[in-house]
Amino acid sequence: MPLTFAKEGEPISIKKVGGKEDTRQFLENLGFVAGAAVTVISTVGGNLIVNIKDSRIAIGKDMANRIMV
């Protein structure tokens, strides 16, 4: 399922990252790689604030839909 459907506060594992090559590379540079643990902190209008690798990152709904958990 896409990251946008994840429950807030529950750590989950990333299965794969989709999208075009440049999009995947951008997300990988932020730490969104297969096997990494990610926790959704909050959701506002479909946009997410997530905790990954001891950092809080805000990502848009379209980017979050490319991250499968």
Image (cartoon, helix red, strand yellow):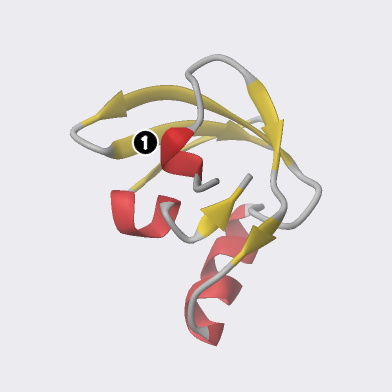
User: Measuring 63% from the left and 44% from the top, which residue is drawn there?
Assistant: 69
Instruction: Give the side of residue 37 with respect to residue 7, left or right.
Output: right
Taking depth in this image into account, of 38 and 5 the one nearest to the observer is: 5
Q: Secondary structure at mark 1?
A: strand
Q: Is residue 53 left or right of residue 9?
A: right
The number of numbered badges drawn on the structure is 1
Q: Nearer the viewer, residue 32 or 67?
A: 67
Residue extending furthest toward the top: 9
Which quadrant of the view contains residue 13? Answer: top right
User: Compared with residue 56, is residue 62 higher up or lower down, i.e. above or below?
Assistant: below
Image coordinates for residue 53, horizontal then vertical, percent: 70, 37
Residue 39 versus residue 57 in the image, above or below: above
Residue receiving disc 1 = 48
Going 31% across and 49% down the picture, which residue do you hit? 61
User: Is residue 61 shown above or below 18?
Assistant: above
Taking 67 as reference, is 13 left or right?
A: right
Q: Residue furthest right?
A: 35
Residue at the front extreme? 1
Q: Residues within 10 Å of mark 1 (few under 14, many from 20)?
A: many
Q: Residue furthest bottom?
A: 21
Q: Amino acid at mark 1?
A: Leu
- Residue 44 vs 59, above or below: the answer is above
Relative placement, left or right, of 23 versus 48 is right
Residue at point 59%, 55% (across, down): 30
Residue at the spot x=76%, y=56% of the render? 34
Residue 48 screen position, x and y as percent? 37, 36
- Picture quadrant of residue 44: top left
Q: x%, y% of residue 3? A: 50, 42
Point out residue 68 in the picture as x, y percentages from the top left corner. 59, 52
